[in-house]
Amino acid sequence: MKVNELFKEELKVINMGLRSFADDVKSQDVPVLHVDWRPVAGGNKKLSSLLSKLKSK
Amino acid sequence: MVSKWLIKENSYYDSVTLMIITKEIEERDDAENAVVVMGTDLNKDLLKNVGLLNDEIKNTTANDLIIAVKMKDESKFEEILAKVEELLNKKKTDGGEDYTPPTLDSAIKYMPDSNMVVISLPGAYAAIEAKKALENDKHVMLFSDNVTIEQEKELKELAVSKGLLMMGPDCGTAMINQVPLCFCNKVQKGNIGVVGASGTGTQEIMVQIDRLGGGCSQAIGTGGRDLRSEIGGLMMTLGIKALANDDNTEVIVLVSKPPALEIAEKVLQTLKECGKKAVVDFIGGDDELIKKYGFIAASSLEDAAYKAVALAKGQEVQEAPMFSESEDKLNKLAAKEREKLGKDQKYLRGLYSGGTLCDETLKLFTKEFGGIYSNIPLTPEYKLEDNKKSYKHTALDLGDDEFTVGRPHPMIDSYMRQQMIIKEAEDKEMAVLLMDVVLGYGSNEDPAGSLADHIKLAKKKFTDRGQYLSVVAYVCGTKSDPQNYDEQVKKLEDAGVVLLPSNAQAIRFAIKVIRG
């Protein structure tokens, strides 16, 4: 199982959302990449859903 | 009163950052009402309720930052804007100058060997990003709530098919490879693995294991709905199998609110097949079922830790003692507290930041003393009519939704608890104020300091009336937590708080003071 491979690896984190969660991981000297996320299509749900359909083509 | 506002297009900030800034601006004398938010539909409703919505704000998107203030003197607006700007910049630079890619795809390209994606985005977007992460073979910790149960099922089925962790939604606590994630204490390394459907329940067990000289290998969070029949314990069973295959884990602890019978049987059957020693705490649930499968049931979170540590050390398993110190000593201490109370003082008031700790208090109080009112009551007849107005014996979970609308969780921000302490102090019939103070990553950097002055103020109100307020608390934390455990304890003791070493002991002590 992939989980058991994870238990043997070094944890490497991607963080999306609250910046403080990334800062906490970083303060423990664990590699972390914070995503400067923002809502797709400015949060317009209709446009966002259309874009997502286009991407999955 | 005038309303002034500024819209900054394409400036996204997370909700916790903005809530903290809003609070800071609201505390100024020159701002009557302040709202600093992104232009989501929910936030526009919030602005409407406080009379700050207008046509220009109506046209904003979830990507636009709105700073709206109601004030007496409009010349102060520039000063307020400058303060908001300063706070926003501070937040941005706190994280350093590291590269921050704009999307998950670009993050994965930049760090292809990343293995865990932690997501705390608004619920509507969180599930989309979680699915993307799983499709890229990354494990996921999904802190966000407001993800539908159908989405949860789809995500967990995808994760199970790939052997990946899908912790959450609404998963607040995990420790993977000794790294605490989101809200989690720093504990010693050891051979006990925890799978928990409850955040503060998992934190309490980990902390108690650490105090008893044990240690943890992994702590896997599942999210609170995992054991509901719609999800069927998909992540708890995957977690058990993962710990079963992990050479560093010798003892498994499961913690959850009581699951549906068929799900409990499925989980216990999986545990039985894995062949490792285990302690199960279905908080307040059916111990007989657990024993039927040959496992050890726990009567409290502390008891779960106590029994797990005994198993891990190859010792005989016994019930955790009612108190770590001699009961005689605590009886004397309780009597000393009690004799200072006025004759009308008879009720317990619990103000909790941890939901499972509050739930455990309700269960232990009900079992050992009698009914207790709450916003999360054990039975409907003990539901408070008004959740902000305590009645007789009451314990509140201040992390529950209605207390956190527009505010960070009480483990991050003590504002709501400070207000409630002062409010409760008006009630002459209160005898004991009971609280949890949760340390660890994710929590407030100085929770004891943020509560101490309000505790002193509440005590003074009682003294001024010729009464006495007994304050009992439990610090859920370890010496390795970032807050400095000893300093936190000292700040509370200096405020006159009686501290007990576990949540269960704190409630038992509070009952002694009330009952006499």
Image (tube, coloured by chain):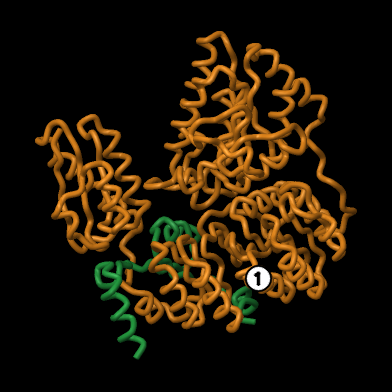
Residue drawn at (71%, 75%) of the image: B241
Q: Residue furthest bottom?
A: A57
Residue A4, horizontal then vertical, whole percent: 65, 77
Instruction: Tell me, by letter, which chain the rendering colours green.
Output: A
Q: Residue furthest right?
A: B316
Q: Residue furthest top?
A: B466
Residue drawn at (68%, 19%) of the image: B337
Q: Does residue A54 appear left or right of residue B422 in this picture?
A: left
Q: Quadrant of the C terminus of chain B?
A: top right
Considering only vertical position in the picture, is B98 above or below B339? below
Q: Disc 1: which chain?
A: B
Residue B459, horizontal then vertical, whole percent: 53, 19
Residue B200, horizontal then vertical, whole percent: 60, 50
Residue A32, can we see it? yes
Q: Does residue B120 appear left or right of residue A11 in this picture?
A: left
Residue drawn at (34%, 57%) of the image: B14
Mark 1, other Cα within 10 Å: few <14 / some 14–19 / many ≥20: many
Residue drawn at (28%, 74%) of the image: A46
Q: Nearer the viewer, residue B380 or B270?
A: B380
Could you say which quadrant of the image residue B166 lies in?
bottom right
Q: Secondary structure at mark 1?
A: loop
Q: Amino acid at mark 1?
A: Gly
Q: Which residue is mark 1?
A: B232
Q: What is chain B's hue in the picture?
A: orange
Q: Residue furthest front?
A: B381
Residue B293, horizontal then vertical, whole percent: 85, 65
Could you say which quadrant of the image residue B511 lies in?
top right
Q: Nearer the viewer, residue B260 or B107?
A: B260
Q: Quadrant of the N terminus of chain B?
A: top left
Could you say which quadrant of the image residue B413 lies in?
top left
Residue B436, can we see it? no
